[in-house]
Image (spheres, grey):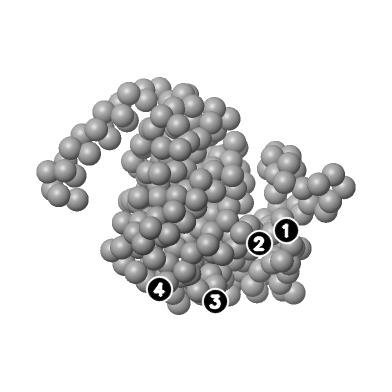
Amino acid sequence: MKVVILKNAAEVAAYGAQIFKKQLNKKADSVLGLATGSTPVALYNELIALANKGELSFKHSKSFNLDEYLGLDGDHPQSYRFFMNEKLFDHVDIDKANTQVPPGNAADPVAACEEYEQAISAAGGIDIQLLGIGRNGHIGFNEPSSSLASRTRVKTLTKATIDDNARFFAEGEYQPHLSITMGIGTILESKKVVLLATGSAKAEAIKATVEGPLTAACPASALQLHKDAVLIIDEDAASALSDPEFFKHIERENQQLEKKLGQ
């Protein structure tokens, strides 16, 4: 697991965007795993800016989103399909027919989960998966106690997650308590994982992810098993780590090595 500590949220977004740019320029038909939430928005803004400058293209890529609220149609303003259209897809040259979000309005959600897994497999698997992290260490909607081998499935959201997401819903508006989410096992099959975290509210979750035991109590700790996972975090999110200077030293050395290798 690679941990990159940067000064602020803007640097985190810019660094992450460069990883996606490199991926798309290396493999134009990359399969992207995408995420919603407040942290990825800044990265999407960076990608839109790069696309507008002609530095990358989504034209031949495909995407699969991590999760969706169960019970919301794709045109609902709080659905993750609506979010992705508004925050990214409407502003780049991706073919929306090649963008997949779990169907929150599925008549048979259990069958829809299996079909989602099959669609990812048929696409050749996910080349690069973007993640955020919840204060309780959840990734996607894989809440604490989720199996580390889990696949795409229906999940009940914890009260903490419901409370955190309540700010996106108007008072009195229906807020789903169920979701469809990629499983941790599904995420771990991605060829590369990029997790973004900013702010002191994520500090304990980051500490548990990086330094804690591998445990279902912190779903993100499963990334310790991934062969190519990078955590890009700001100073505040890194504040609970035992030795953040160690990770900064490693990153400086990695940057020097990449220069020598011409990467």
Left or right of 55? Residue 168 is right
Gap between marks 3 and 1 measured at Cα: 20 Å
- Residue 159 position (above or below residue 250): below
- Left or right of 62 in this view: 106: right
Which amino acid type is marked by label 4?
A: His
Q: How far from the left and from the top, in percent, is residue 259?
A: 16, 43
Where is residue 79? Give x, y as percent: 69, 59
Q: Which residue is mark 2?
A: 82
Which of the marked residues, 3 or 1, is nearer the chain's N terminus? 1
Asked whether the beta carbons under mark 2 and mark 4 sit within 8 Å of each other, the answer is no
Residue at (58%, 75%) from the top-left corner? 115
Instruction: Identify the residue at image location x=50%, y=50%.
Output: 45
Q: Which mark is on residue 77?
A: 1
Q: Earlier in the sequence, mark 3 or mark 2?
A: 2
Residue nearest the viewer, comparing 179 with 237: 237
Q: Earlier along the polypeptide chain: callout 2 or callout 4?
A: 4
Query: From mark 3 to mark 4, how far is it between C-alphas?
Result: 11 Å
Per the image, label 4 sits on a secondary structure element best described as: loop
* Image vertical order of residue 232 relative to residue 211, above or below: below
Residue bearing the label numbered 4: 60
Q: Find residue 16 and report its horizontal and vertical position in percent.
A: 40, 47
Where is mark 3, residue-wise?
A: 97
For badge 3, the amino acid type reads: Ala
Q: Are marks 1 and 2 in contact (CB under 8 Å)?
A: yes
